[in-house]
Amino acid sequence: MRKKIVVGNWKMNNSVAESVQLATEVVEALGEGFSGCEVGIAPTYLALDATEKVIAGSEVQLVAQNCHYENDGAFTGEVSARMILAVGCSSVIIGHSERRQYFGETNATVNLRVKKALSEGLKVILCVGETLAERESGVMETVISSQVREGLEGISDISAIVIAYEPVWAIGTGKTASSAQAEEVHLFIRTLITELYGQSAAEKVRIQYGGSVKPSNAVELFAMPNIDGGLIGGAALNAEDFVAIVKAASL
Ligand code: PGA
């Protein structure tokens, strides 16, 4: 039985003070000794350090929204895996569609980042997902398959990897994939993982769904056999909604 995992991706929202406030509310709303599923929050880099102090001792894990594939050097505006590890991150999101869409990330750079993060001891949430145009033109499976294959190229052990399926057309749009639509792609990804890593690894790997998850649709999505939790954007900016989604993954 896979333990579900719910992570709040705060994106470029919240100052340090606001992040501390939101993290405090999340910890309080979850309550002590929560163990229903794995929970993480991903504030802006600036707030990682301060947020870590708030969640220390709770079940909430600190997650970064990205990291670079070099340890240090002339990479203006970037942050390395070692840096996020040093402030207490246990995981990092890599290959989010906004990184691919606005910041030129490719499957090749995603792969470099995944490898670096793993080699430094971080767990990785590898994001994949098709655009509406790709879905409508019938290339969804080809796109997802290359994102998974190329993102994982050269990686022999995926035990520290979670895959997040996030259809681009459902992110921040209020349009959620139906639970059946999401399940279909999750099953496709798990079958692909079976092909690449064998049945035992495929049975263990967690595949999160992301894209307009809300308290009102979380229960149905998380009830699907191949949906192992969620990567939550908008709804994670409200502690009550986020914790309701976490609890939906803990049923
Ligand atoms: P959303 O974002 O929940 O606001 O759609 C999800 C994500 O981008 O991870």
Image: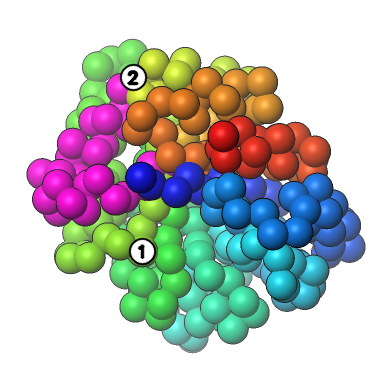
Q: Secondary structure at mark 2?
A: helix
Q: Main secondary structure of the magenta part?
A: helix
Which residue is located at x 33 percent, y 13 percent?
136
Which residue is located at x 43 percent, y 66 percent?
123
Would residue 42 appear left or right of 191 to someone viewing this image? right
Q: Is mark 1 within 8 Å of ligand 1?
A: no
Magenta residue span: 184-208
- Residue type indicated by callout 2: Arg
Q: Position of residue 78 (x, y in %)?
A: 55, 71
Answer few, some or many: residues within 10 Å of disc 1's Cα (few below 14, many 20 plus, some between 14 and 19): some
Which residue is located at x 58 percent, y 27 percent?
218
Q: Position of residue 21 (x, y in %)?
A: 88, 57
Would residue 195 appear left or right of 243 to someone viewing this image? left
Residue denoted by label 2 = 135
Please state which of residues 69 and 62 is positioned toward the viewer in this rendering.
Answer: 62
**Image quarter hosting the C terminus:** top right
Numbered mark located on residue 160 in the image: 1
Mark 2 or mark 1: which is in front?
A: 1
Numbered mark located on residue 176 in the image: none
- Residue type indicated by callout 1: Ala
Q: Position of residue 150 (x, y in %)?
A: 22, 52
Mark 2 or mark 1, which has the lower sequence index?
2
Would residue 155 appear left or right of 167 to someone viewing this image? left
Q: Position of residue 207 (x, y in %)?
A: 38, 42
